[in-house]
Amino acid sequence: MGIVYLFLSGIFNSIMVSFNGQLGNYHSLFVVTFIVHVIAAIILFIYIPLVQKKKIKLTGVPLYVYTVGILGVTIVAASSWCTGAIGATAVMSLSVTGQMVCSAIFDHYGFFGVKKIPFKKEQIPAYILVVIGIMLVING
């Protein structure tokens, strides 16, 4: 079931990037980023107490974890701006590549508590194919 959720997440992410790019035609980059995060916050402030029946608390978590907010703002702003400049397909291709490389580093070293999974030289051809694919998408 997790694979289905991840697949849907990828679809929703692509739709979001495209819509953010369109929203950028009407508002500044910072307004788009603000709108996206305010809407998300409103939905979650309603959903968590009503559906999950949980109280929202921000204690008991290491402070560095809250940098996720800064990362979220950066991702939305960058993808919104770049979609207008290079298109949604190139944005998503480059984004997924960045995620893959960073995740491989996190896995290899076990950063941030992820399970340590050493990088194998047999994976290198897959990374090369991804880079070739991105070059074809961007320059195609």
Image: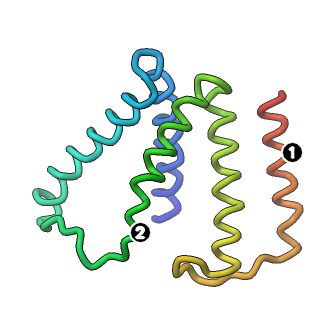
- Tags 2 and 1 touching, CB below 8 Å: no
**The C terminus - image quarter:** top right
Question: Mark 2 = which residue?
Answer: 65
Mark 2 residue element: helix
Q: Earlier in the sequence, mark 2 or mark 1?
A: 2
Residue at image point 70% right, 51% down: 97
Residue 33, horizontal then vertical, whole percent? 40, 35
Residue at image point 32% right, 33% down: 35
Label 1 environment density (alpha carbons within 10 Å; few <14, some 14–19, many ≥20): few
Residue 113, horizontal then vertical, whole percent? 52, 81
Residue 81, horizontal then vertical, whole percent? 55, 29
Residue 16, horizontal then vertical, whole percent? 46, 36
Tag 2: residue type? Val
Which label number is shown at residue 132?
1
Tag 1: residue type? Ile
Measured along the vertical axis of the image, is residue 53 above or below residue 35? below
Distance between mark 2 and mark 1 Cα atoms: 34 Å
From the image, state whether disc 2 or disc 1 is nearer to you.
2
Residue at image point 14% right, 67% down: 54
Is residue 1 shown left or right of residue 106? left
Quick one: 18 or 81, which is closer to the camera? 81
